[in-house]
Amino acid sequence: MGEQQHDRVEGGRRSRLSRRRFLGTGAAGAAALPAMGTLTASAQAADKHGGKGRRDLTVAPKRRGIILYTVRDAISRKDRAEQDPDTGRPLRGGFRGVFETLSRIGYREVEFAGYDQGENGPITPRQLRRLLDDNGLVANGNHGSVPGEINAETIAQFEQDLDTAETLGLAHMGTGGDPTSSSYKEDWDKAADVWNFWGERAAARGIKLYTHNHHDAYGFLLDSGPQDDQGRPTRSSGIRKLEYFFDLADPDYVHFEMDIFWAYVAQFRWVDYTDPDGVSRRSIFDPIDVVQAQPHRFPLFHVKDGASNPESDDGYDMVPAGTGDVPLKRLLDVIEQQGFHHPNYEQDNAGGGDEDPSQSFRFAELSYRNIAKWRD
């Protein structure tokens, strides 16, 4: 495989980073996937960052955030007068009740996952902003929709979304999905053009546009080898899809939110590929290497934990932050909190339904306490 080059931004100066260093382990040289919960060589080396004299910067109180998708069950229900038998507290609902509860727990930042509050009816951006301010909360992003096509209608909608972002005080606006679900190089080329267009429009308003990863984005790009019956490539040169997108997306206009859980799922799932000559190759993916190479391109993170489960297709089962085996603290320590990273706790399965309506709040409180301990 050739030495593909990747931009690295250091204090405003862009240097070059080789693909081999970006991946951490060469495809042909890696022998086996590390066991879940163990450290790769690069992660062990990262322990040296800071030494004994360095102040532990994970995670500053003002940066302790949560994506509201975690408590979406509470947002969509009305406030309830009855108390939860486990906590003795009312079962709060709607944005007002959720913001008051999260603020009491200690969270200071939230990331929206849309602006719908279900049974509580419509709410305007100005009303949302007032609720944020009243509870000492700052919104650091939103998972919305980034249009896949560029036309008069989508431009008007995107500008309206930017208006909402400005009202809420968002420094970042993005989507909860990958730039494309395709594995083909051509589709990633198109996605980069579209994202560069929208990113430039967002930047003109002082807002960073970001895309959120799942494990598929770290899979291997189909960019070579024999073609299928539709003229599409069937093999890979070993470049990962999101790695390829890094090169195409303008670093001034397109940013990224790493979901740490899904990145480590990718380490478990995306190991082998077939090279242009039909030879099976192995490449070990290291999320810490990816972030270390270009930390300024990752302003946001999802702090999502998982308990190791080799029997699962993903290698992990989601659990509250700080109770699993995903090296969340290690990754956040390595990048160092430089005042611009925003780590948001997320747990997709936090909701307990009618059987346990307070579960998502309990998990949010447990996760907050665990994240706060990382700094002690």
Image (tube, rainbow, N blue to C red):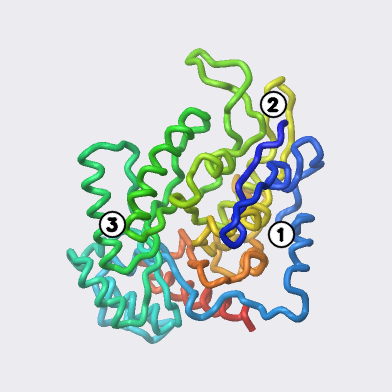
Task: Work out how far the residue at label 3 is from the one at label 1, CA to CA, in angstroms.
Answer: 40 Å
Check disc 2: other Cα within 10 Å, few if <14, some if 14-19, many if 20+: many
Q: Is residue 310 left or right of residue 230?
A: right
Give the number of the mark in front: 2 or 3. 3
Outermost front residue: 13
Circle 3 SS class: helix
Q: Position of residue 61 (x, y in %)?
A: 51, 81
Q: Quadrant of residue 98?
A: bottom left
Q: Which mark is residue 162?
A: 3
> At 38% from the left edge and 39% from the top edge, which residue is drawn?
194
Which residue corresponds to mark 2?
A: 275
User: Neighbour class for label 3 at 10 Å: few (<14), some, many (≥20)?
Assistant: many
Left or right for 270, reference 348: right
The earlier-in-sequence mark between 2 and 3 is: 3
Q: Label 1 neighbourhood size at 10 Å, few (<14), some (14-19), many (20+)?
A: some
Is residue 253 shown left or right of residue 166?
Answer: right
The x and y percentages for residue 82 are 29, 82
Question: Where in the figure is residue 176, as x and y percent of width and height?
Answer: 41, 52
Q: Secondary structure at mark 1?
A: loop
- Nearer to me, 260 or 15: 15
Which kind of residue does numbered mark 1 sit on? Answer: Gly
Q: Residue at x 30, y 79 (%)?
A: 133
Say above or below: 375 vs 239. Answer: below
The residue labelled by disc 1 is 37
Image position of 2 (left or right of 137): right
Nearest to the observer: residue 204 or residue 279: 204
Which three-letter amino acid code belongs to the residue tagged 2? Asp
Type of the residue with mark 3: Leu
